[in-house]
Amino acid sequence: MPEFVDSTVREIDERLRELREEATRLQAARAALTGARARRGRPAGSGRQGTRPAPRPAASRQTTGTNRASGRNTRATQALELVQARPGITIPQLADAMKIQPNHLYRVLRRLASQGQVKRDGQGWRPA
């Protein structure tokens, strides 16, 4: 009986391996047809069940970059308003006020500076 179980487990493992390879090929083909990039990492549902935390509700997610619905760059707008209200504010202070990580703000402020809306003043930022 143990031989039957072992051989059946090996057959199941082999079939699962084949199915994973086929899923990868199908995802690449789908991406090529739709013009989307193939996703990296494991296919959805390939991990252990129950280990992924539940997604947060959309209202509590922090958005970054462009607000596609309204066409506004909300982080840049928010940062610009804070710089205008508190000239000389630093990136860590901005991040704290905006309740986000500071690493994103370096890019946002560099873009605002290239657009001539803010300028660097030592460690802080001022309206241009």
Image (tube, helix red, strand yellow):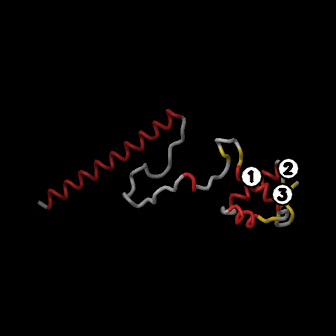
Which residue is rendered at x = 82% and y = 48% of the image? 115
Question: Could you say whether the residue bearing mark 1 is in a helix, strand or loop?
Answer: helix
Tag 3: amino acid: Gln
Image mark for residue 116: 2
In front: label 2 or label 3 = 3
Q: Would you name the residue on which mark 1 appears?
A: 76
The answer for how far apart the CA atoms under marks 2 and 1 are is 13 Å
Local crowd size for mark 3, using a 10 Å CA cut-off: few (<14), some (14–19), many (≥20): some
Residue 110 falls left or right of residue 1: right
Q: Quarter of the image holding residue 4? A: bottom left
Tell whether label 3 touches label 1 (CB within 8 Å): no
Which label belongs to residue 84? 3
Q: Quadrant of residue 69?
A: top right
N-term-proximal mark, 2 vs 3: 3
Tell me the quarter of the image containing the N terminus.
bottom left
Mark 1 vs mark 3, CA separation in Å: 12 Å
Residue 8 position in % (x across, y down): 20, 53
